[in-house]
Image: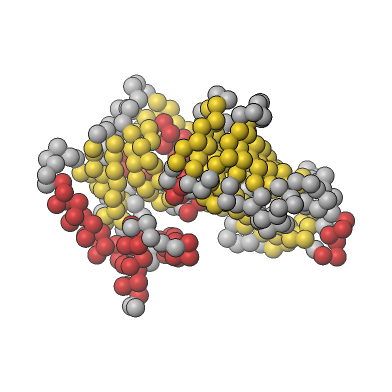
Amino acid sequence: MEEKDFYQTLIQRYLDKQLTDDELEVFIDLTRSGKLDAQFDAVMDRELNSIVSADLKQPKTRKLWFPLAAAASILLIVTAGTFFLFLQKNNAVVNQDIDPGSYKAVLTLADGRKIALTDATNGKLAMQAGIEITKTADGQLIYQVKEAEQKTANATLFNTISTPRGGQYQINLPDGTKIWLNSESKLKYPASFANLKQRKVELIGEAYFEVAKNKALPFLVLSKQQEVEVLGTHFNINSYDNELVVKTTLLEGSVWVRTTNNASVNKVIKPGEQSVLRSGQLLVNTVNTESEIAWKEGIFNFEDENIQSIMRKLERWYDIDVTYKGAITTTTFGGKISIHRPLSKALKLLESTGDVHFKIEGRRITVMQ
């Protein structure tokens, strides 16, 4: 298959939600590099033709355009107060840009020493409890047990990794567990799980976990007002202090969610389900897991979200301060946009609806109708 045909097939499979995990990784890398830009037209023209044909029967539908990736953009269709977005090429002019976030974090060792991972040299950073800590160029912090020193591991030593606004980072723990930490988040964890009866970490903010299986050593995540227990599974926890609810979304395996204030309030959730903790009550819903972990894949994926929810996400990723002037629109929005694009792309997209406008003063954004 020729390269351009492969690219078009990859794009079409993404739109049809048929990508395998390996294909999705390739798709994300190609999108970030801009190599897919020239191939968006052919695939999107086919999508657009079918959309336009359907729209001819709905004269009250408004259509608006705005860029998504380097040469791709989003078509918005307004139906019943919700904006649905589709991809298409467009070259809109960007007036003001605030750069997106990147791999940024600070590691605090058990002795209190802080290491700014953004500035640290790639390679070995430190030794803690018989564990070698190294940093890679692609935003990973890796903990590896040194066999000769494993018996000396001290389980009382805790490390903490914190991401600022506009930062993300991946941590690979010594048991093989992988954790992706979203912006403005913090994770506290033992430098080693040796001689422990459980693998317990503490989370503030949002993180995606791929927990290494170990039936003899349960993995626990303590976050805002809840505790999640697993043996080995893939799940996402959103527990920001400025969000009204704590969301735990399961992709693989099973997890047990219980509240810290009342152990009798607990749920076991299955793949495709999400527990929502609000005011001490724990509910379980079926959700689109792709939307919930889109941030890990480099995408904002909004599904019927109000403007305040969207702006909180933009605030954390672009390191901006958001205020509101006058009435706040009740319109909900849906769609996707790359987190690797400047802030102006997302703001212009929202402004194109006519229901919201923005005043930009440095890093302060005022939201108006």
Q: Viewer-proximal residue, 232 or 317?
A: 232
Nearest the camera: 340 or 47? 47
Answer left or right for 7 relative to 232: left
The answer to whether residue 183 is seen in the rendering is no
Which residue is the extreme one toward the top? 326
Placement of 140 over or under 85, stated as above or below: below
| Rendered residue at 35%/25% (across/down) | 328
The residue located at (26%, 37%) in the rendering is: 353
Q: Is residue 40 visible?
A: yes
| Quadrant of the drawing holding the C terminus | top left
Side of 141 relative to 60 (left or right) = right
Residue 265 percent location from the top left of the image: 61, 29
Q: Is residue 132 above or below residue 160?
A: below
Q: Nearer the viewer, residue 96 or 356?
A: 356
Image mark count: 0
Determine the residue positioned at 40% across, 26% down: 324
Counting from the top left corner in percent of width and height, residue 139 is at: 59, 57
Q: Which residue is farthest right?
A: 152
Location of residue 162 in the rendering, given as x and y in whole percent from the top left corner: 64, 43
- Image position, residue 244 (x, y; %): 51, 28
Q: Which quadrant is home to the N terminus?
A: bottom left
Residue at 33% over, 67% down:
9
